[in-house]
Amino acid sequence: MIAENLEIVRKTIQRTAENCGRNPNDIRLVAVTKTCPATAIQEAMLSGQYLFGENYIQEAERKIAEIAPAAQFHYIGHLQSNKARIAAQIFQMIETIDSLKLALTLNRHLVQIGKTMDILIQVNTGNDAKKSGASPEDAENLVREVSSLTNLNVRGLMTMPPFFDNPEKVRPYFRQLRSLAENLREKNLFHDNKKVEISMGMSNDYPVAIAEGATLVRVGTAIFGSRQ
Ligand SMILES: *Cc1c(COP(=O)(O)O)cnc(C)c1O
């Protein structure tokens, strides 16, 4: 099941990229494994998937301990400062930095363990009071501040737009994130302005996100089935 689903998602990524004139290799699939057992991650690895996304620190810590070190994990949940110490240890990237306070705490833990981490700034493109993320207006300032911290590399932006059944309704939010990233790239604000990461798109809308410039798509349900 997981192998077949992965194949479908990969083919969709490839076809969508080609249809809009993008190189499929510029788009990385983050297989979202929140609530899935470690065995599901191992099964995906047997099909060549090595990049995963997790939302809950304790769950991720337990599962990552069981998984071969070849796998990489991105944190995509809302990070609380009191979990930043563990997050610093177990993740390759944190996609959801949305405040200077959180960045400072994470940086302090990274300094202690002598590790540098790639991060994304989460932007609340929908300006939704219930969602985390810096407002689009504050994003530039936050990118500048976080970039000044010694052990964090700001690689790009991430968003989790409002949910719509019709993925076309999400397109304006993806477009907004892309244009914000482009704007900050022109000001040379990212760690690597030749390769700026844009994390957007989930099971329901990742083809639209790819058409709008995503470099990381975060897909759970379409690979592992629906969660409880
Ligand atoms: C759960 C989650 C996903 C994956 O959602 P699906 O609809 O299952 O593909 C992607 N991004 C974030 C931030 C999530 O929390």
Image (cartoon, rainbow, N blue to C red):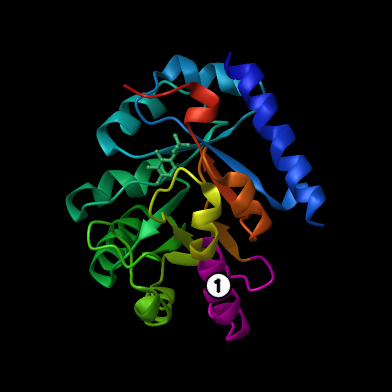
Q: In the image, residue 11 lies at what x, y percent?
A: 74, 33
Question: Residue at (42%, 19%) from the top-left corner?
Answer: 38
Question: Residue at (66%, 65%) from the top-left corner?
Answer: 195
- From the image, tell me which residue sits under label 1: 181
Q: In the image, residue 24 lies at what x, y percent?
A: 76, 47
Question: Residue at (47%, 21%) from the top-left corner?
Answer: 225
Q: Is residue 94 magenta?
A: no
Give the amino acid type for the residue marked by disc 1 in the picture: Ala
Q: In the figure, is residue 139 to the left or right of 170?
A: left
Magenta-tinted stretch:
174-195
Residue 161 appears in which quarter of the rendering?
bottom left
Q: Which quadrant does the N terminus fall into? A: top right
Question: Compared with residue 172, is residue 144 higher up or lower down, i.e. above or below?
Answer: below
Label 1: how many residues lie within 10 Å, few (<14), some (14-19) or many (20+)? many
Residue 108 appears in which quarter of the rendering?
bottom left
Q: Nearest the camera: 177 or 184?
A: 177
Circle 1 SS class? helix
Q: Quadrant of ligand 1?
A: top left
Q: In the image, residue 8 lies at what x, y percent?
A: 68, 27
Q: Nearest the camera: 158 or 88?
A: 158
Question: Compared with residue 147, is residue 215 higher up or lower down, i.e. above or below?
Answer: above
Question: Residue at (29%, 37%) from the top-left corner?
Answer: 56
Q: In the image, residue 35 lies at what x, y percent?
A: 34, 25
